[in-house]
Image (tube, rainbow, N blue to C red):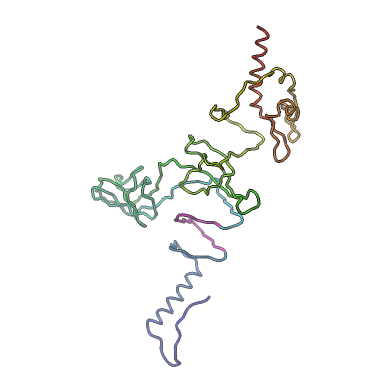
Amino acid sequence: MSVALTLRSVKGTRLTNAEVDGNFTNISTELDLKAPINNPIFTGSGQFTGALTVDGDLEVSGTTTFVNVQNLGVADTMIYVNQRTAGTLTAASGDGTNVVYTVDNNYVVGDFLVVQGVTPASFNVDGAEIIATSETSVTVASTNTDTYVSGGSTYAKTYVNLDLGLAGGYNTDGTESGYAHTGVFRDATDGGTWKFYQGYTPEPSAGIDINTGHASFQLAPIAGSTISATDFNSTSDISLKKNVSVIENALDLVNRLEGVNFEWKDSSKAAIGVIAQQVEEVVPTIVNTGSDGIKRVSYDSLIPILIEAIKELSAKVK
């Protein structure tokens, strides 16, 4: 333990009362830092070295929080993005124009306040716009002039339609400039569609949408054993296409393709389909070879071939 103490300047002299009080204060402060602290509040900047154990809830308020660790483990089974932190109400007063709530939380002007469990209930609100804040209070417009008695909890919510998701940076080519972002997000500008993306060079930050119109934005491929959904929609807008032409000799293409029965090696599950290598010899444009060397077939792309083949058959019958 290291404590700053004021010592006698000359042997035989006495410390002043202020110097003695200062020594006791410094010793007390040092002892408090070594012992468990109940409900501490730290403001400004600081640094902890070694391990820090928090037995209870930890709230960090600010603009940006960095966690500089190699591995981050989360025991909770649900990570809540954009959650608004709850607060405890201790007082409320209204002047007929505004109500000021005394609450242990920092809210943001423009968010919407929810107050519950107050006596009297006239102080309870569900989505009142916050017009002013301080470190210990939040203000909303209200004609309420009742007298606060007890109770109350608060939280704030936003009605702004934001992108929600996770992003991570990665190096693309082993150089300092080769840096991009990948992740998954709910695109607020596209009806809330969830998108996996890669190659995105702008720095994602809170409150700023992922710009899907940016030249670097790319939808990322997804691999899995089974994908289930009530509907699959493939992008097919004419505005995105050029050099459009009707498939010719579609019946010949179909006759050269082979539908097969098979079993997957890893699961022995029976299935039907096509063989990518054989399809590639007939219609190479619908076969993709991944970085792992595995070939994949766009089964959806077989449908236009079948459509034109049926039309050719129909013409022959007529």
Q: Quadrant of the C terminus?
A: top right
Residue 128 falls in image quadrant? top left
Compared to residue 237, the image places residue 96 above or below, namely: below
The image shows residue 308 at horizontal and vertical percentages of 64, 18
Which of the two residues, 227 or 79, is positioned nearer the viewer here?
227
Image coordinates for residue 240, horizontal then vertical, percent: 55, 30
Q: Position of residue 292 (x, y in %)?
A: 72, 40
Residue 72 colored in magenta in the image: no
Q: Which residues make up the magenta segment?
A: 51-67
- The percent coordinates of residue 35 (x first, y second) are 50, 68
Identify the image quadrant of residue 26. Answer: bottom left
Q: Is residue 33 above or below residue 183?
A: below
The outermost residue toward the bottom is: 12
Question: Left or right: where does residue 232 sit relative to residue 156?
Answer: right
Which residue shows up at 47% across the image and 70% down it? 32
In the picture provided, is 171 more to the left or to the right than 164? right
For the point 38% across and 55% down, the residue is 104
Q: Is residue 64 magenta?
A: yes
Decide whether the magenta segment is chiefly helix, strand or loop.
loop
Q: Residue furthest front?
A: 243
